[in-house]
Amino acid sequence: QVQLVESGGGLIRAGGSLRLSCAVSGGTITAYTMAWFRQAPGKEREFVANILGNPYYADSVQGRFTLSRDIAKNSVYLQMNDLKPEDTARYYCAAGPGTANHRFYKIWGQGTQVTVSA
């Protein structure tokens, strides 16, 4: 059974940086497209980025966020720079097909909260 555990969230001021981690157990990250989604209160879950070979980003984070993976550690990372208040959300790691549609992902972590103050 594949399990995902996120970490690295927190409270930060606008313009700051955070690095989220997603540790994977029970499966190898190379077998899946690994993705990050986020969800703010009252809003639908939103695609952030995914990676199988090359990373792919939502327009809203392109140029500010960097998705990477460490195969030896079976983990993926989301480096978030120049954070904005609108980035405030709970961030979820997911494993699944190569799509930006969260409905197609069946494996999810519990999420980690990112709060960006103005």
Image: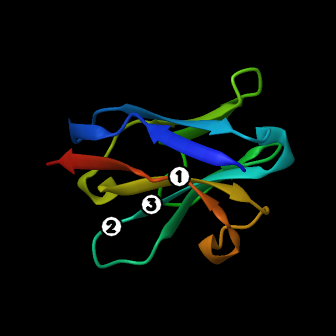
Residue at position x 43%, y 36% from top?
Answer: 7
First in sequence, mark 3 or 1: give its number: 3
Mark 2 lies on residue: 40
Q: 99 or 21, which is in the foreground?
A: 21
Image location (x, y in percent) of residue 27: 78, 42
Can residue 56 be seen from the camera position used here? no
For residue 38, the mark is: 3
Image location (x, y in percent) of residue 79: 49, 34
SS for callout 1: loop
Q: Nearer the viewer, mark 2 or mark 1?
A: 1
First in sequence, mark 2 or 1: give its number: 2
Image location (x, y in percent) of residue 98: 78, 61
- Colouring of the image: rainbow
Distance from Cα at disc 3 to Cα at disc 1: 12 Å
The answer to the question of whether label 3 and label 1 lie on touching residues, with beta carbons closer than 8 A, is no
Label 3 amino acid? Arg
Can residue 115 be seen from the camera position used here? yes
Q: Which residue lies furthest to the left in this view?
A: 118
Q: Residue furthest front?
A: 1
Q: In which quarter of the image is residue 105?
A: bottom right
Mark 1 lies on residue: 109
